[in-house]
Amino acid sequence: MDVRRAGERYSGGDLAAGIISFHAFSFGPHYDPDNLRFGPLLGCNEERLAPGAGFDEHPHSHTEIVTWVVEGELTHRDSAGHETVVRPGDVQRLSSAGGVRHVERNDGDVPLTFVQMWLAPLEPGGEPAYEIVRGIADSTPYAVPEAGAMLHVRRLAGGERTAVPDAAFLYVHVVRGEVRLDGAELAAGDAARIADAEEMDAFAVTAAELLIWEMAAG
């Protein structure tokens, strides 16, 4: 198990524009050849947008982009004609495939925080696709077959224990709260990368929310 602390993430964004970013993997000007990916996972970015702030239209290709809103509301618009507002509890996926452009903004009047995760597809190219699942139920897995991956969202009460999947690659990101994962203490913003995970569980020291990626070897 490789534990990465919240404070070890690369910080970025544009304070003057109301954007604060924290990157768990090599990203943009923060190039780290030893931290490019974990299995198919290429990025796990925490983005904080002030009211009215956002990312103007920009391109993506050959990436599966999954977004989880922590607080506030995210407005998404893309070149394929989709326009949605993503709220806490929703899972949004943009399959950029051969290429797509999109805009992400905080059009609300309260701060927005979201976690965005990027995965490499098993095969490049294809047509862009978009999906949003409203209010995904706890423990209901969300499949991203294009990347050989499955997202598990777990919301735990203090003192609750949950099994985590066996997987060739397992990535656990703590959205909020404190958990004990196979003896390792993790707090909000911390993450664990586990290769060949077997028979592990997570114990909620406090009420907690976890994003758990179960990923195949590819």
Image (cartoon, rainbow, N blue to C red):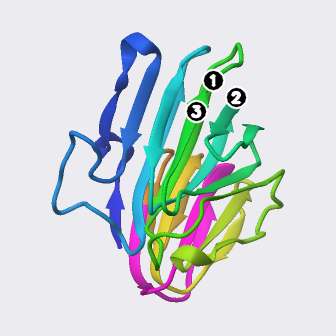
Q: CA distance from mark 2 to mark 1?
A: 8 Å
Q: Residues within 10 Å of mark 1 (few under 14, many from 20)?
A: many
- Range of magenta residues: 192-218
In the rendering, at what x and y percent does residue 209 appear? 65, 52
Which type of secondary structure does the marked residue at label 3 adopt? strand
Q: CA distance from mark 3 to mark 1?
A: 7 Å
Q: Which residue is mark 3?
A: 104
Q: Which residue is mark 1?
A: 106
Q: Earlier in the sequence, mark 2 or mark 1?
A: 2
Q: Which residue is mark 2?
A: 72
Q: Residues within 10 Å of mark 3 (few under 14, many from 20)?
A: some
Q: Residues within 10 Å of mark 2 (few under 14, many from 20)?
A: many
Q: Left or right: 16 with respect to 69? A: left
Judged by its main secondary structure, the magenta piece is strand
What residue is shown at x 72% (from left), y 58% (from top)?
Answer: 156
Q: CA distance from mark 2 to mark 3?
A: 13 Å
Membership of 46 in magenta stretch: no
Q: What is the quadrant of residue 15 in the picture? A: top left
Q: Earlier in the sequence, mark 2 or mark 3?
A: 2
Q: Taking 133 as reference, is 84 above or below it?
A: above
In the rendering, at what x and y percent does residue 27 appear? 29, 47
Q: Nearer the viewer, residue 112 or 7?
A: 112
Q: Which quarter of the rendering shows the N terminus?
A: bottom left
Q: Nearer the viewer, residue 135 or 185?
A: 135
Query: What amino acid type should be assigned to the residue bearing mark 1?
Result: Asn
